[in-house]
Amino acid sequence: MGKLEGKVAVITASTRSIGRAIAEIYLSEGAKVVVSGRSAEKGEQALSEMNAGENAHFIACDAVNQSEVESLIDETVKHFGKLDIVVLNAGGIMGAAPVAEMTDEVWNHALDINLNHTFWGMRKALGYMIPQESGRIIAMSSMEGKLAKATLSNYTSNKHAINGLVKVAAHEVGTLGITVNAILPGLVLTDMFYESMPATAETMGVTLEEAADMFTQPAAIKRPNTVEEVAAVALMLARDEARNITGCLFPVDGGTMPY
């Protein structure tokens, strides 16, 4: 029997990269999984490649849209009949600039995809989990939620805030069988990295390779992390055996942070 047999999970931004790896490891351990993303075409392609049959279902969701994030949670319960695990994985670096030059548009976009999406999804999920007195909520933060780099104020401040949100929520529902934790990946060479980092590197005045080195050289293992390494932590936190782990921030950064 798989470690997540009988569980129902929903993962935001899970047609590719880290979210996809989490969906796959959950399916391999017996969970029923709702995969989500903006593109229905990419969603159906992901389901086909996962080859999970009725155990996987796609629901379109743009994580910057509050109503779509909340509907995703509702539709998961309607489709599979329950809700056990929510992974709030969507996020990203939506543009880099010094604080003095950051536009409202870039700031607010980062706020929606990172912090607001996490808050909307968490609040909606707790509406189901509190009455049943069980559940797992996992937020995708970043090592930047404990660090700071010039020109990344929008991304960094959101990840710091997600860490605080996780800790507060964990204290609010800790006696109800619900755990709330965050994963803090270091550099992962995902599609997001290759899509967003060239412009960020240019703003920093460095090459893409130099930007990657800024993240990996402080690490003990001196290499990027893999999506599978992040997914392994998401699996651990979703298991019944993790019932006493809550309000925690789990680095998957190859030893970048000293604490």
Image: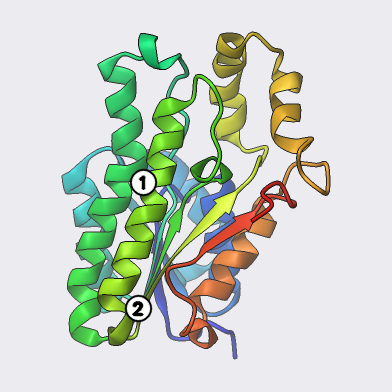
Res 222 visible: yes
Please tell me which residue lies in front, 74 or 167: 167
Q: Position of residue 212 (x, y in %)?
A: 71, 28
Q: Which mark is residue 125?
A: none
Q: Residues within 10 Å of mark 2 (few under 14, many from 20)?
A: many
Looking at the rendered structure, the secondary structure element under dot 2 is strand
Find residue 195 and report its image quarter.
Answer: top right
Residue shown at the point (32%, 51%) measured from the top left = 118
| 31 w.r.t. 140: above or below | below
Residue that extends furthest to the right in the rendered view of this protein: 221
- In the rendered structure, the answer to whether residue 93 lies left or right of residue 119 reads right
Image position of 163 with respect to 235: above or below: above
Which residue position holds label 1? Answer: 161
Mark closer to the chain start, 1 or 2: 2
Q: Secondary structure at mark 1?
A: helix
- The picture places residue 137, in percent across and down from the top left corner, at 38, 67
Residue to which mark 2 is pinned: 135
Quarter holding residue 219: top right
Query: Considering only vertical position in the picture, is 141 above or below 195?
Result: below
| Residue depicted at 64% across the width and 8% down the height | 205
For the residue marked with disc 2, what is the amino acid? Answer: Gly
Q: Specify whether residue 49 is in view.
A: no
Residue 83 falls left or right of residue 232: left
Quadrant placement of the N terminus: bottom right
Type of amino acid at the residue the image marks with label 1:
Ala
Nearer the observer: mark 1 or 2; the answer is: 1
Q: How is the image coloured?
A: rainbow
Distance in Å between CA atoms under marks 1 and 2: 22 Å
Position of 48 with respect to 108 (left or right) is right
